[in-house]
Amino acid sequence: MRTMTFFDENHRNGGGAVPNPAEPSTLAPSAEFSAPISAAENPIGDPFTYGAIHPQPFKFVEAAKGDLDVPWSWGHFLLFILFGVFSFVLVQTTFVTYYILTKRLSTHPAQKEFQQFAYSTPVFAIGSMVVWYALLFFFLFATATFYYHAPFWESLGWRRFSPENRKAPRSGWIYFLLGCGMSFVVMVLTISVKAPEHAPIQDLLKNRAMAFAFMAMAVLIAPFVEETLFRGYLYPVLTRIISALLRFFGMAAPQAMSTGISTSIIFTGVLFGLMHGYQLGWSWAIVSALIGVGIVLTIVRSRAETTLASFFMHLGYNSVIAFLGTIGLIFAKYVKLPPPHH
């Protein structure tokens, strides 16, 4: 029997003669490999072919940031406090110097003279606060934009109501009406409290022009500024600092975050109430009520995950007080009301 060699024909497979390797090949290249592959002929879902024709890198979509995922740190918080104190002293000194140079205030005014001047001059009492607020906003804007390279308003919690958040209402009107209701609750709780006779707020409202300016500020400026600073900045940065300290001392991350949120809500509310202590003559019954208001506003901010919610609630709270106070001024009636915040 003859043994088949590499040069014999394979009749079983129907193959033709195998060319001699010594002879040059005359076979033309296959059209299957020589013709370019068009994009339309590529198999759908073939990542290798797609990558060869479209070599651009794949662009990943960044995950949405959490409500408390803010750029601020404890170092920024300390700088903010220092800047706030320094800028407040600078603004007050500048305004006082101006009025001394214009002869509207004596060179060395006594405490009573200075208080009378401050309570009767809206440009000084209101204007100096507006300038101070503007400087605080400038500090936050500059550090967020040029140092952290973070979006300014979003870093302060100013975002739209999320339709996916089921923990709180998603309508500004609901929060506004809740704020109006909270104002009446505070009136009922403090109606029997005797306010100090010479509390700064009482002396301030004795001047008609000053009282109207104060009411306007309570509605147009105070809710926006206070919610941005307390609920937009202080609440998340304090939560971050407290939770970091708890993790450092061995607490588990989820428990540390939950405790940090609760502690920050209380701490922010206490600061909010104490900030109004001086103008209320340190009437601790009213200050305590305002601490409760601050805690409620921070809880609303935490549940809604946006400063917009606490802003609308604060706006409703101050609007009721300013409206009733204005009616009382117009008709020369004295109505016992909790003071609006500024």
Image (cartoon, grey):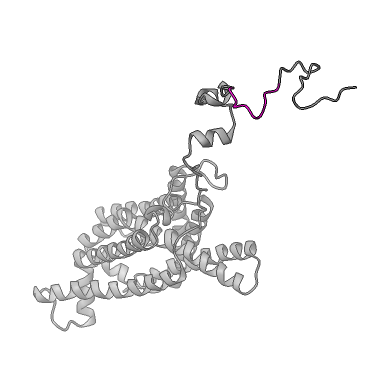
Q: Nearer the viewer, residue 2 or 336?
A: 2
Above-or-below relation of 91 to 228: below
Which region is colored magenta?
18-26
Disc tally is 0
Q: Residue furthest right?
A: 1
Report x, y in % for residue 147: 37, 63
Quarter of the figure with the C terminus = bottom left
Q: Nearer the viewer, residue 201 or 252?
A: 252
Please state if 68 lies on the left or on the right of 131 as rendered.
Answer: right
Q: Is residue 88 within the magenta segment?
A: no
The rendered magenta stretch, by its main secondary structure, is classed as loop
Report x, y in % for residue 223: 36, 56
Q: Is residue 24 within the magenta segment?
A: yes
| Residue 337 appearing in the image | no
Q: Nearer the viewer, residue 280 or 303?
A: 303
Above-or-below relation of 186 to 196: above
Above-or-below relation of 152 to 38: below
Report x, y in % for residue 13: 78, 18
Quarter of the figure with the N terminus = top right
